[in-house]
Image: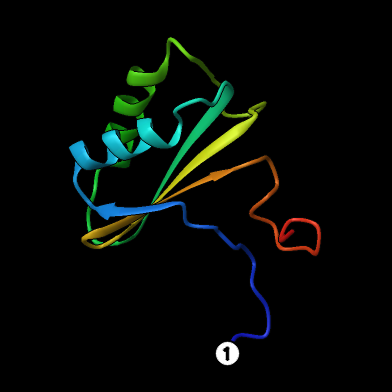
């Protein structure tokens, strides 16, 4: 096992790496949430157009959220791992490992 971890992501949902499935899952995950949001997409394995999914999700939620990459209340993090993608909803700094972030 590794001696340390730089980031830990709680996974709220996992879906097939498909634009339509990611948009549906993201809007369901953000249901009943509000504030400002940053949408992050990282391709860990495979090929996928992250910018396209960020723009599509942003377009779907722009009436309920302010899109902000620097001062956000929530971060929707999409990790693309080949045919599977995970979605995490994080508060600022939550992906940094500490005793406080894990509780």
- Residue 45 screen position, x and y as percent: 30, 64
Q: Residue at x 53, y 31 (%)?
A: 38
Residue 15 vs 4, above or below: the answer is: above
Secondary structure of residue under mark 1: loop
> Residue at 57% across / 29% down in the picture?
69
Image quarter (top left, top right, bottom left or bottom right) of the C terminus: bottom right
* Residue 62 figure quarter: top left
* Res. 102 image quadrant: bottom right
Residue 5 pos. (x, y %): 64, 72
Identify the residue shown where x is 55% and y is 58%. Answer: 9
| Residue 36 drawn at (x, y percent) | 59, 22
The residue labelled by disc 1 is 1
Q: Residue furthest bottom?
A: 1
Q: Residue at x 54, y 26 (%)?
A: 33
Number of numbered callouts drawn: 1
Q: Residue furthest top?
A: 63
Side of 14 where 37 appears, left or right: right
């Amino acid at each position: 096992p590794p001696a340390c971890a730089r980031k830990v992501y709680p996974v709220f949902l996992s879906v097939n790496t498909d634009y339509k499935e990611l948009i549906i899952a993201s809007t369901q995950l953000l249901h009943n949430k509000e504030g400002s949001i940053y949408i992050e997409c990282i391709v860990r394995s495979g090929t996928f157009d992250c910018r396209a999914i960020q723009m599509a999700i942003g377009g779907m939620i722009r009436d309920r959220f302010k899109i902000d990459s620097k001062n956000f209340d929530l971060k929707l993090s999409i990790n693309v791992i080949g045919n599977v993608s995970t979605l995490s909803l994080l508060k600022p700094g939550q992906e940094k490992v500490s005793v406080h972030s894990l509780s």
